[in-house]
Amino acid sequence: MYAIQAQDVSKTYKNGVRALDHVSLNVRKGEIFSLLGQNGAGKSTLIRILTTYLKPDLGLVQILGKNLSMKAARIRPKIACVGQQTSIDTYLSLEENMMFQSRLYRIPKTQAKLRMEKLIQDFGLQSYRKYPVSSYSGGIKRRLDIALNMMSAPEILFLDEPTVGMDIQSRMAMWDMLKKIRNDFGTTIFLTTHYLEEADILSNTVCIMKDGKEVTQGTPEELRSFIRQDALRILFPTKAEAEKQMVFLQSVFPASQMTVRNTDIMMNTEDVRSDLERTAGFLLEAHIPFYGIQIVQPTLEDVFLRLTKKKEMGEEK
Ligand code: ADP
């Protein structure tokens, strides 16, 4: 059963920017679905459409089995959206915010109090309940905002870049919270991110977008297997040296796809062991200065670069 089904969704803004170009995706109930893409890919536009803030020009969207264009008012109470701007009132405490939210959703007071206690306990927010939200750090505020949005017990929680700008501790605390929401509350989570690591660690399904189109959709494992299991990383002292040597290496290994990342050459190979030997032999014989060669597992960044490069070259997925 799907929580979200979007088919051929397109949106062009009044200024002529085509933010979405026939995007299709399916989100299963109870999963964490990450929409991954660089700035301007169209992620926020899609989230605005799925949360009923914006109408698409074209396409069919079903949320929890209901047609979005016809049943928006029925869908709204079942979803919650945490944007990049917090919706929480920072002058009020977490408890005050939660009780206020429960009145908006017409939740009876005793039920609201029980729900509030459960959320505060489950998310370990006991120490943040009484003081104004403004007194806490950005990362804590974001988590309080999510807890607040869970007061209405949404079936789908939309999160637009939930960890943008956070330090690693805050991001890990956020990941724990999101996993708990999926595992213990059964809520479907739809999030946007431009952090590959985040999509990899958190998601059941990842959809990669570029220029308003989806490039591919699958599990993090499927996406990694998409570009062969291993790659070679050849370490150089400088980026300029890596770029220079890539031209030579490419002439020796014309079939291998190579990119320079920082001061390294990343090389996809069919047969990593024999290519490791051949590359090392070639570099040593030619007296090319290099720091080392490693066999590495591809990251989602490799998947992204590979897939987007293929698309740009007009190849099939
Ligand atoms: P992302 O969230 O992936 O960064 P957006 O959906 O915000 O992408 O933007 C997609 C494209 O649409 C970008 O080129 C952006 O400049 C443009 N865009 C976004 N919002 C508007 C708007 N309100 N009016 C005009 N263009 C917009």
Image (spheres, rainbow, N blue to C red):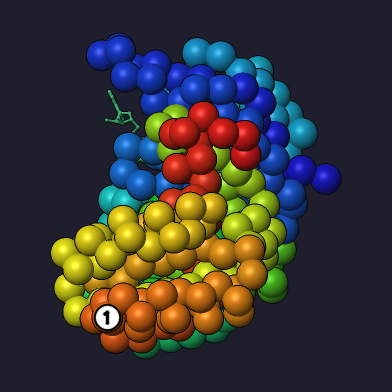
Q: Position of residue 105 (x, y in %)?
A: 54, 47
Q: Quadrant of residue 79?
A: top right
Q: In the depicted view, which residue is nearer to us: 153 or 217?
A: 217
In the rendered image, the vertical position of residue 132 relative to residue 58, given as above or below: below
- Observer able to see residue 107: no
Q: Quadrant of the C terminus?
A: top right
Is the distance from the Cβ of mark 1 to the nearest ligand 1 atom less than 8 Å? no
Q: Position of residue 291 (x, y in %)?
A: 29, 86
Relative to 205, is 247 on the left or the right? left
Relative to 126, is 123 on the left or the right? right
- Residue placed under numbered mark 1 in the picture: 287
In the rendered image, the vertical position of residue 87 relative to residue 48, given as above or below: below
Q: Amino acid at mark 1?
A: His
- For the point 31% across and 56% down, which residue is it? 247
- Observer able to see residue 317: yes
Q: Position of residue 102 (x, y in %)?
A: 51, 55
In the rendered image, the vertical position of residue 310 relative to residue 242, given as above or below: above
Q: In the depicted view, which residue is nearer to us: 52 or 113?
A: 52
- Give the quarter the ligand 1 occupies: top left
- For the point 16% across and 64% down, which residue is it? 240
Q: Position of residue 29 (x, y in %)?
A: 74, 52
